[in-house]
Image (cartoon, rainbow, N blue to C red):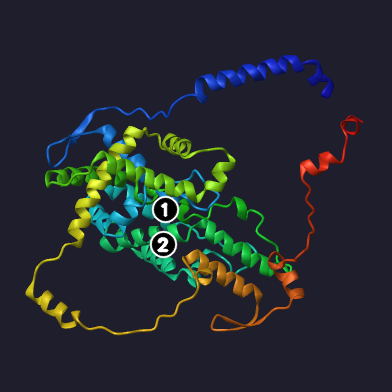
Amino acid sequence: MLRLLRRHQRALFIFITVFIIISFTFFGTSETQSISYSNDEIGSTLEGNTLFYKDVEVMRSFLKYDLEDQGNSENIFGGNFFNDGVLKEDFFKSGLAAVLITNYQDVFKDSLTGKHKAEKNFTLYQHPYIKTLGTAHIWKDFSPQLLEHYQKLNNTSNPLDSESVNSRIQLYLAEKKFNQDLLKRFIYFEESRNQSKGVPRDAYLMRRDLSLFNYKNIDDWFSDKFLNISAQFIYNVADLAEAKGYSVDSEEVEARILFLAKGNYEKFQSHLEKQEMDLDAYIKIQLTKLGLTHKDLFHVMRKVMLFRALTHDLASSVLDSPFSIESFNSFALEKVQVDRYELGSDTKMNNLKDLVLFEMYSNAVAKESFKGAIKEYKDVKTLKTQAPHLVQKKFKVKVSEISKSFLAARFSIKQTWD
């Protein structure tokens, strides 16, 4: 084989060189290219402005993934860091999504009915060797609301009634928090605890898809119709906001784009600097992945900001009523002095993931516990067999250092040549 390579190395070198030059010519120096959409008119907004097919498709691309879809910290280019949760915060949590689905039942009927039938036949993961280890068992212990919404959705007969729609929405939000990456961590941990008893691991666990219903994005959960309606709704509300006097200037839009991009860049800065990638290059890669140009991003970001300006103002407004003023005045001047105690920043649980990891650690090292508090720790010998990854050994290393100038003074030029 080596003789063959030596014999043809010149031809191979020329071929590789030409291939690299061609690659850079056609791809390496190209700018971000957007997906080409037709510019057909599909209707008009409430204020009479023309709505084009391209507008809806660009907004769909922007909404389909958000910042949370990055998943674990290694997924640098996952999700869409320009979208800080428009659908999650402004549609699902606000109740707007449920209103849209229930009011457009004719649009969603076929797709959601088909999904509902398939979901009823879906089987949750069960470990092949440990009967008490599976998706349902983990949900029951660590995310009972997920199991509750899953059972509610399965028990409904009409996927378009308000109870079924709300269960689907709550299940979607809960599954985004407790995704398959976190689920697999629990399974790996339980497997390691049972390994000392001779129970084999699930050899296919790493390759298994443990996503609920095997759904990956918003289209899978609510059909592609939902993004279309949501995009059109944002355009309509944004135009209505402008008609009511709301405005967002170019500097605000650019500042918002830069703020979101910079925040995410700093999150992965150490990884990105190793790849010699600056913020501009990082933004271009994200736009390319989304199939958008900077002009497209500016357009949808401005519409989203107008949409939020109006909806947030309406949501925070209250009716002037003498009864509300009277009830407010009854306790407005009351006050109480309290002593506040809190844990230090190093011991705080900032999110569900921190709490889960602490629970897993406590279960691993505790010999005896009382209501979650560790009363007695396992000895090191036991930990070495049950949880070897938690046992560490310290080493002292002596390091000597010498400068180049000091070293050079001790050797002559002749000695360096010898």
The three-letter amino acid code for the residue at tag 1 is Ala
In the depicted structure, whether residue 174 falls above or below residue 259:
below
Looking at this view, name the residue that lies furthest to the front. Answer: 409
**What SS does tag 1 mark?**
helix
- Residue 302 lies, in percent from the top left, at 26, 42
Q: Residue at x 26, y 57 (%)?
A: 98
Quadrant location of residue 331? bottom left
Residue 248 visible within the image: yes
The disc at residue 118 is 1
Residue designated by label 2 = 174
What is the quadrant of the N terminus in the image? top right
Would residue 216 be found to the left or right of residue 87 on screen? right
Determine crowd level at label 2: few under 14, some 14-19, many 20+ residues with C-alpha closer than 10 A: some
Proximity of marks 2 and 1: CB atoms separated by less than 8 Å? no
Which of the two residues, 321 or 197, is positioned nearer the viewer here? 321
- Residue 31 lies, in percent from the top left, at 43, 27
Q: Residue at x 39, y 62 (%)?
A: 154
Q: Earlier in the sequence, mark 2 or mark 1?
A: 1
Q: Residue at x 33, y 46 (%)?
A: 256
